[in-house]
Image (cartoon, rainbow, N blue to C red):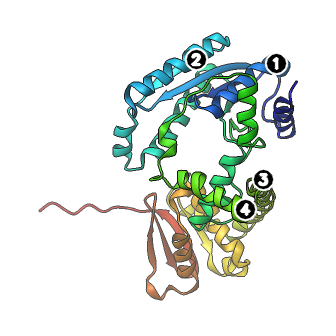
């Protein structure tokens, strides 16, 4: 067995990503990364004792070329004796409907398709092909956007049912594996367009950092991310404990979907935990922390510390924060309709 597969197995076993008897839905775009992932899992299928199902999503953004990629994935999967399900989704229309970028709409569609297939088959895992270079790009993108520790920790090996078996493997190792095993793949020309920040990081920033500062920057960023994830997990545990100290028993008297915190207790917590307590509560109330920015958290803290600018602020997710004496209340915003004359 070659070094690639040994390293892949080490990652799977170390992080307990896939177990014997698991059903694994594999996200396959037809590109080099996903083809390497599929081929490696097919090669280890009997040894790991797993079942595989390929899912391919045609975003309908590149016309005939996208249709050819879908046909390519179907043909390869059939030749490797893996069932395949192809979704055809008009991502451009959904991006307009959801008021988000094509990239975000595509990501949401892909994960919806993967989760739908896994649930229908009662499969335990969804395998995606993110690797060490993708991790480095994610970290640098988060740095450029002004991220906290969560963003600096990058992607996890596992989040829910989604696993990333290639996360310890570099792009060079993937390319070598493809060449050695003569594995065909498709190339998406949109990955070369510099209009996207992610592409500029991959094609311009990382090569510049490698040439001018550190040829091993990708590995360095991956190691940093792993350390930060462990530290961040500990801080999240402390934040959950801190939140329980700050939450008031009287919150049960509030409407559903709200939380009341003791401001004196919140201000007794370390500053780093104050922010995390508020993020923890917003996460519980909204289910999606990505919509809350640094400014939202700071405005909530300002409301607790010095409510000179007012006693109410509006937040994403139809939430609001308001101060009531020594209580900081985060709740669903009630929209009052104007009376008809």
Above or below for 253 versus 47 = below
At horizontal 73% and vertical 41% (from top left) the residue drawn is 172
- Residue 94 visible at all: yes
Q: Relative to residue 9, is residue 163 drawn left or right?
A: left
Q: Nearer the viewer, residue 157 or 167?
A: 167
Spatial CA span between label 2 and label 1: 19 Å
Which residue position holds label 1? Answer: 49
Spatial CA span between label 4 and label 3: 32 Å
What kind of element bears circle 2?
strand
Mark 1 and mark 4 lie on one chain; the one further toward the N terminus is 1
Mark 3 and mark 1 lie on one chain; the one further toward the N terminus is 1
Spatial CA span between label 2 and label 4: 41 Å
Which residue position holds label 3? Answer: 219
Q: In front of the other: label 3 or label 1?
A: 3
Above or below for 319 versus 180 = below
Tell me where residue 124 sits by quadrant.
top right
Mark 4 and mark 3 lie on one chain; the one further toward the N terminus is 3
What kind of element bears circle 1?
loop
Q: How many numbered callouts?
A: 4
Q: Are marks 1 and 4 in contact (CB under 8 Å)?
A: no
Tell me where residue 25 sits by quadrant.
top right
| Residue 135 at x, y percent in the picture | 68, 50
At horizontal 81% and vertical 27% (from top left) the residue drawn is 19
At horizontal 86% and vertical 27% (from top left) the residue drawn is 2
Which residue position holds label 2? Answer: 84
Q: Quadrant of the C terminus?
A: bottom left
What kind of element bears circle 3?
helix
| Residue 54 at x, y percent in the picture | 61, 22
Above or below for 159 versus 48 = below
Above or below for 240 versus 31 = below
Callout 4 crowding tier (Cα within 10 Å): few <14, some 14–19, many ≥20: some
């Amino acid at each position: 067995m070659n070094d690639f597969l040994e390293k892949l197995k080490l990652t799977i076993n170390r992080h307990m990503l896939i177990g014997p008897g698991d059903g694994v839905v594999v996200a396959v775009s037809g590109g080099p990364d996903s083809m390497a992932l599929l081929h490696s899992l097919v090669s280890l299928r009997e040894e790991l004792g797993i079942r595989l199902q390929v899912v391919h999503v045609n975003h309908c953004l590149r016309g005939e070329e996208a249709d050819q990629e879908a046909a390519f994935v179907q043909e390869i999967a059939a030749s490797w004796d893996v069932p395949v399900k192809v979704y055809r989704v008009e991502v451009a229309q959904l991006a307009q409907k959801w008021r988000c970028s094509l990239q975000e709409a595509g990501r949401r569609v892909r994960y919806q398709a993967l989760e739908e297939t896994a649930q229908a088959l009662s499969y335990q895992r969804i395998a995606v092909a993110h690797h060490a270079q993708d991790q480095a790009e994610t970290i640098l993108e988060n740095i450029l956007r002004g991220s906290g520790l969560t963003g600096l920790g990058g992607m996890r090996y596992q989040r829910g049912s989604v696993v990333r078996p290639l996360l310890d493997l570099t792009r060079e190792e993937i390319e070598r594996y493809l060449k050695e095993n003569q594995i065909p793949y498709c190339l998406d020309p949109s990955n070369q367009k510099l209009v996207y920040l992610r592409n500029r990081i991959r094609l311009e920033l990382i090569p510049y950092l490698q040439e001018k500062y550190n040829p091993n920057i990708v590995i360095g960023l991956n190691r940093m991310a792993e350390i930060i994830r462990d530290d961040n997990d500990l801080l999240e545990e402390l934040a959950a404990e801190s939140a329980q100290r700050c939450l008031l028993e009287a919150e049960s008297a509030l409407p559903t979907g709200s939380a009341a915190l003791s401001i004196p207790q919140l201000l007794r917590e370390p500053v780093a935990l104050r922010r995390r307590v508020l993020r923890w509560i917003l996460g519980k109330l909204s289910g999606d922390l990505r919509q809350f920015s640094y400014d939202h958290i700071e405005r909530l803290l300002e409301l607790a510390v010095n409510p000179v600018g007012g006693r109410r602020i509006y937040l994403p997710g139809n939430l609001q924060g308001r101060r009531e004496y020594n209580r900081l209340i985060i709740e669903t915003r009630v929209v009052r309709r104007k009376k008809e004359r």
